[in-house]
Each structure stands twice: as C-alpha cells, then as structure tokens.
Image: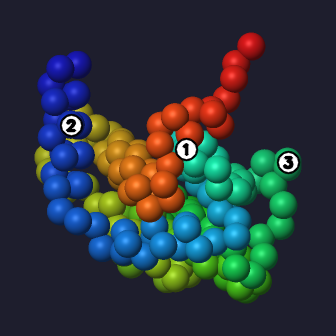
C-alpha cells in the first residue's frame, strides 16, 4: 500500500507542478456564468460532483447534469465536463448539445486531441506522466482523478479570494446532516 500511495502522491504532484493553461479563463467563466452545470460519469463524475458541492458552498447556482432537479442549460450558462479520456460518448454529446444553445463548455481531460476537447470552448489539460509503474500502482484514471480533485480544490481557493468568500461563509452553506 505504501508504495502505491507514495507513487500516486509523487505523480499527482508532478502533474500539477506547473501552472495549468486556461485556469484564469476557467475561474473567470465560473464567476461570469449565470448558472454552472457540471457533468462527468464514473469516477470522473464523482470528482466533478465534489467540485459542484464546493461551488454550491460558495453560494453559486450550480447543478449536476442528469440529476432529476437539474434545469435546462441556456445561453450564458457554463458547463464543465470532466472526462479522463475525453472520449466518453455522453460527455461528447452533452458538450455538443449545450454549445448549440449558447452555453460555454470547459473540458477537464487528459486528452487534448479528444472529441470532447474539440467540442469545448476551453480545454483544461490534466495530463499525468506515464511510466511503467502506473498500471500496477495507479490503474486506469487514478492519477487523472486525484490530480483533478486537487486542481478543483485549488480553483475553489482562487474563487474564494476573488469572490470575497471565507471558510466561515462557506460553512453557512454546508450541508447539515441530521
């Protein structure tokens, strides 16, 4: 276990060691959107949902695409789609549909040449390095998913600063479990 966890931490750190192109545009798009929609499937979807929760705690109007209470996407909205490969059919279809209605699409992916990237206005590339140990110590999209979670949390810190939010103001919007 230790070998795998040390490997994952090292590789995620390498993935995020440089500034990620498009980050300022991503932050500004969130701030400027009337509504923010988030989408992803599988583990990418779980990471996307964690980001959506934090955005809600910031006081933004945020929805996860596919939930029963999600309204329709309209012109002026932002849609953030998370897909490791950028080839998940539902992610590509979502991007194509929402762009037709005038929404802005930001893809979070490891594949700059994917169909999702082509269907998006902005591509945030989270591309972990590949080596011989990856398949054994961090299979499938593990490195992308972990790096994306940390990237999203860093976006929250930047949004907090720009929107004048604090942990205290966010806590007031935190779910109360009974």
Residue 131 position, x and y percent, is 14, 51
User: Quick one: label 3 or label 1, which is nearer the N terminus?
Assistant: 1
Give the Cα distance between marks 1 and 2: 23 Å
Is the residue marked by circle 3 packed among few (<14), some (14-19), or many (20+) residues within 10 Å? few
SS class of the residue under badge 1? helix
Is the residue marked by circle 1 packed among few (<14), some (14-19), or many (20+) residues within 10 Å? some
Q: Kindly identify which numbered label has been placed on residue 68.
A: 3
Quarter of the figure that contains the N terminus = top left
Residue 145 position, x and y percent, is 40, 46
User: Quick one: label 1 or label 2, which is nearer the N terminus?
Assistant: 2
Residue nearest the viewer, comparing 49 with 26: 26
Residue 155 in sight here: no
SS class of the residue under badge 3? loop
Residue 103 position, x and y percent, is 68, 79
Residue drawn at point x = 81 percent, y = 55 percent: 70
Residue 124 position, x and y percent, is 39, 69
Q: Kindly identify which numbered label has been placed on residue 54.
A: 1
Residue nearest the viewer, comparing 107 with 113: 107
Quarter of the figure that contains the C terminus = top right
Foreground label between 3 and 1: 1
Residue at the spot of label 2? 9
- The image shows residue 76, relative to residue 167, as above or below, that is below
């Amino acid at each position: 276990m230790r070998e795998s966890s040390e490997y994952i931490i090292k590789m995620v750190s390498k993935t995020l060691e440089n500034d990620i192109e498009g980050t300022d545009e991503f932050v500004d798009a969130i701030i400027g959107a009337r509504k923010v929609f988030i989408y992803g499937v599988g583990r990418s979807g779980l990471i996307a949902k964690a980001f959506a929760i934090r955005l809600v705690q910031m006081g933004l109007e945020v929805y996860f695409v596919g939930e029963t209470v999600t309204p329709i996407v309209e012109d002026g909205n932002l849609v953030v789609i998370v897909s490791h490969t950028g080839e998940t059919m539902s992610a590509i279809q979502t991007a194509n549909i929402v762009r037709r209605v005038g929404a802005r699409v930001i893809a979070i992916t490891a594949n700059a040449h994917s169909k999702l990237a082509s269907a998006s206005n902005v591509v945030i590339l989270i591309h972990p390095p590949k080596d011989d140990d990856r398949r054994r110590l961090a299979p499938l999209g593990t490195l992308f998913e972990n790096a994306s979670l940390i990237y999203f949390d860093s976006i929250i810190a930047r949004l907090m600063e720009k929107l004048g939010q604090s942990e205290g103001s966010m806590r007031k919007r935190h779910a109360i479990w009974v």
